[in-house]
Amino acid sequence: MYDILIIGGGPAGLTAATYACRAGKTVLVLEKAAFGGQITWSPRVENFPGFVSISGNELGDKLLEQAMEQGAEVELEEVAGLARNGETWTVRCDSGAAFEGRAVILATGAHPRMLGIPREEELVGSGVGYCAVCDGAFYKGKAVAVNGGGNSALQDALLLSESCSKVYLIHRRDSFRGEQKLVDALRARENVEFVLNASVTALLGEEELSGVVVEQEGRTRVIGVEGLFVAIGHRPDLDAFAPWLALDRAGYADAGEDCLTPTEGLFVAGDCRKKAVRQLTTAAADGAVAALAACRWLDR
C-alpha cells in the first residue's frame, strides 16, 4: 500500500513524486513508455529553468534520478483502469499487476495527433516536431512548414515567421478553421505562403528532414524545408479514467490550477489537464500543486 500512486512518468508525474516524497509520503510512479515523457523526443531543450541547453533524454533522466533519490519507486506498466474500495484505490495494469494507494495523481499527458505517414516517427526531433514554441528557435533563418488549419497551426506559423526565412502553411482544405484575424496577419507576412487543398504525403531526407512531398489538387509538389511542425491537435490519455473525472469537450480533465477533480483522493497534473499553456514549466508546476494537494488530503 502506497500513500500516493502517480500514473505517468513525465515532468508532471516526476515532479509530483519528488514533492510528495519530500513531504514524507510513500510514492509509486507508473509509466507505460519512457520516463521523462515526450520531452525525451527533443534533441535540445533550452527553455527549462536552470539549463542553458540539455537534451530531452538527459533532462528526463535527471527528473527520474531526482524523484528516486527522494524515495520514489517506479514501475514500467501500462495502466488499464482504476477501482475504488472505500478509501483505497486499486490501479490495474495491462500486465495483470495491481497496486494499491490512498491517493492517485493522473499525470498521463497528451500526445500529438500525427500525420500517419512513413518515417514520421523516425524523423521526430530531426526535423519533424509538434511544438513550435519549444523548438522553433532552432530553425532561425531556415525554411519550415506548418501542417494544420486551426488556431494552433496559425499561431505556430506566425511565431515561426518572426525568425524563419520562409514558412509554408499546409492545410487540407481551402479555408482555415482558425480565427480570421490570425489568417489576415499571416497573409500580410511576405515570408508566409499558404498551400491549400494539400496534404503532406512523404518526408524527404536521410538522417535529417530536407523537404516534404505534398499532394495538391491532383498534383505532386516537393517543398524544401528543414523543419515540419505538425499542428493538427493533441489527444489526452484519459480514456481509462473518464468515469472518475469531469472532461471538457476535447477530452481533457476539467480541473483548475488547484489540480482537483470531482472525486476525493484523485488529482490531475500536466498536459492532460484543461489549460491554456502546455510547456515543461507548466507541467512541473502542476506536479508540485497536485502533490501538495494530495498530501493535504491525506493529512486531513
Image (tube, helix red, strand yellow):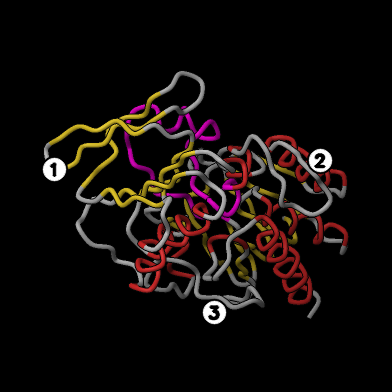
Task: Identify the mark nearer the N-term, 1 or 2.
Answer: 2
Amino acid bearing label 3: Pro
Task: Identify the mark nearer the N-term, 2 or 3.
Answer: 2
Amino acid bearing label 1: Glu
Badge 3 density bin: few <14, some 14–19, many ≥20, Cα 10 Å = few
Question: Which one is in front in this view, the residue at disc 1 or the one at disc 2?
Answer: 1
- Residue 272 coordinates in the image, percent (x, y): 53, 61
**Disc 2 target residue:** 65
Q: CA distance from mark 1 to mark 3?
A: 49 Å
For residue 161, side relative to residue 195 (left or right): right
> Residue at left 58%, top 61%?
278
Mark 3 element type: loop
> Residue at left 45%, top 49%?
112
Quick check: is 135 in the magenta stretch? yes
Q: Quadrant of the N terminus?
A: bottom right
Q: Which mark is residue 217?
A: 1
**Disc 3 target residue:** 262
Quick check: is 219 in the magenta stretch? no
